[in-house]
Image (tube, grey):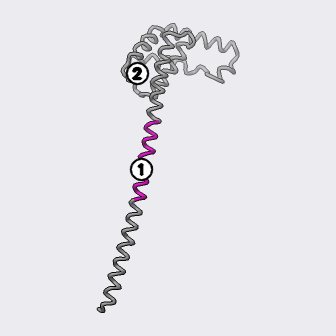
């Protein structure tokens, strides 16, 4: 082989090595950028999840306090709201023996229309449902109040 051919092959090999090195460098930068973007996205989702959890914890406290101390919320409404909050915090929590009353009231009143559907009812229908809710509330009042008190002392809400 001639010296000129050897140098040409060496130069070609070096050029290929440099080109592959640049390609690898570029791919590493792309991979690093993707990893950083994923980490940012995960951090954002974690922050949003924590914010939502904080909202659920605070709302649960407010509703439990309202059940015990406020005439502006009915026991039925409080139970329905707490059942939903507890389901979002921990789907197993409403099955706890102390908090089962929230699920019970929720289930016993699930057929009653709410919001727009409630407003569309005739007054006579509303009264019949209100009578039914009062009967359920009388039946469960002590357990609801005990559950609300216990929930306010529960470590799940104390950490917030």
Residue at left offset 42%, top offset 11%: 146
Viewport quadrant of the C terminus? top left
Left or right relative to 32: residue 73: right
Circle nearer the viewer, 1 or 2: 1
- Please give the name of the residue rendered at 47% of the width and 31% of the height, measured from the top-left corner: 52
Which residue does the image show at 48% across and 20% down from the upper left?
82
Q: Position of residue 33 (x, y in %)?
A: 43, 54
Secondary structure of the residue carrying numbered label 2: helix
Q: Secondary structure at mark 1?
A: helix
Of callouts 1 and 2, the N-terminal one: 1
Which of the 4 quarters of the picture holds residue 99?
top left
- Taking depth in this image into account, of 64 and 101 the one nearest to the observer is 64
* Whole-percent x, y for residue 134 in the image: 56, 9
Magenta stretch prevailing secondary structure: helix
Vertical placement of residue 97 versus 90, above or below: above
Mark count: 2
Give the residue displayed 36% in from the left and 21% down from the top.
155
Image quarter of residue 5: bottom left
Horizontally, residue 9 falls left or right of residue 56, namely left
Looking at this view, is 138 or 153 the one in front?
A: 153
Residue 28 position, x and y percent, is: 38, 60
149 in the magenta segment: no
Q: Which residues are magenta?
A: 29-47
Q: In this figure, which residue is indicated by the disc labeled 1?
A: 36
For the N terminus, give its image quadrant: bottom left
Circle 2 residue: 157
**Residue 128 x %, y %:** 63, 12
C-alpha separation, residue under disc 1 versus residue under disc 2 = 34 Å
């Amino acid at each position: 082989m001639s010296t000129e051919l050897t140098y040409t092959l060496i130069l070609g090999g070096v050029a290929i090595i440099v080109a592959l090195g640049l390609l690898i460098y570029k791919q590493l930068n792309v991979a690093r950028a993707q990893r950083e973007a994923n980490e940012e996205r995960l951090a954002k989702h974690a922050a949003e999840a924590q914010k939502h959890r904080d909202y659920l914890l605070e709302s649960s406290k407010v509703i439990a306090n309202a059940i015990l101390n406020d005439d502006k919320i009915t026991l039925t409404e409080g139970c329905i709201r707490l059942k939903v909050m507890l389901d979002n915090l921990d789907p197993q929590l409403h099955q706890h023996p102390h908090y089962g009353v929230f699920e019970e009231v929720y289930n016993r009143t699930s057929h009653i229309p709410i919001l727009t559907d409630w407003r569309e009812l005739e007054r006579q229908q509303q009264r019949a449902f209100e009578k039914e809710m009062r009967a359920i509330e009388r039946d469960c009042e002590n357990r609801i109040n005990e559950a609300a008190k216990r929930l306010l002392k529960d470590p799940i809400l104390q950490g917030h």
